[in-house]
Amino acid sequence: MAKLDDTDRAILNRIQSDFPITSRPYQAIAEELGSSEDEVLERIRRLKAKGIIRRIGGNFVPEKLGFVSTLCAARVPAEKIESFAAAVNRHPGVTHNYRRDNSFNIWFTFIAPSMEEINANLAQIAAETGITDIINLPATRVFKIKAQFDV
């Protein structure tokens, strides 16, 4: 496990939610934490390089922007997992994917302007990879739970 000091933990806790909307967000975070913008940026670079931070980016509620979202699952043979995941990840509407210990072993979320577009993309993924056992599980009711992890 990576060694984090109190400043690393404070930065990780601060950047998870309510990211400052300003021209210099890392300066604002530094001021809140009693640090400097350069130190915050350097620590974030280091945490990203170590794989502790995967990405920093905005999240939005697809429905409020006229988009639809769905959860998909695929049954992928072990020898095709990497190539299948790469094919899935090439689609800009895929927010993330992950492996599960299940017969449906690759799961991913897809966001697009319409379900028709998602279905067309799933058909393209199936044609490209030869993996046809893909299920589309659109939400019938959405429950959003804030994912804030105290580090």
Image (tube, rainbow, N blue to C red):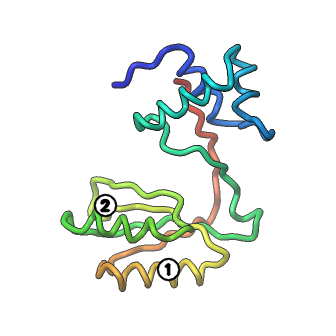
Relative side of 114 to 121, left or right: right
Q: Residue 50: percent from the left, percent from the top?
A: 40, 34
Structural distance between the alpha carbons of marks 2 and 1: 19 Å
Q: Residue 131: percent from the left, percent from the top?
A: 30, 78
Of the 4 image quadrants, the one containing the N terminus is: top left
Q: Is residue 119 above or below residue 46?
A: below
- What secondary structure is marked by label 2? loop
Q: Amino acid at mark 2?
A: Asn
Labels 2, 1: front one: 1
Residue that sits furthest to the front in the current view: 38
Q: Is residue 79 above or below residue 54?
A: below
Crowding at mark 1 (Cα within 10 Å: few <14, some 14-19, many 20+): some
Q: Which residue is mark 1?
A: 121
The numbered mark, 2 or 1, whose residue comes first in the sequence reads 2
Residue 64: mark in rendering? none
Relative side of 95 to 132, left or right: right
Crowding at mark 2 (Cα within 10 Å: few <14, some 14-19, many 20+): some
Q: Residue 132: percent from the left, percent from the top?
A: 33, 81
- What secondary structure is marked by label 1? helix
Q: Amino acid at mark 1?
A: Asn
Residue that sits furthest to the right in the current view: 22
Residue drawn 51% across and 84% down?
120
Image quadrant in which you'd find residue 28:
top right
Residue drawn 31% across and 78% down?
129
Image quadrant in which you'd find residue 93:
bottom right
Q: Are marks 2 and 1 in contact (CB under 8 Å)?
A: no
Residue drawn 54% across and 14% down?
6
Q: Which residue is mark 2?
A: 105
Q: Residue 115: percent from the left, percent from the top?
A: 60, 79
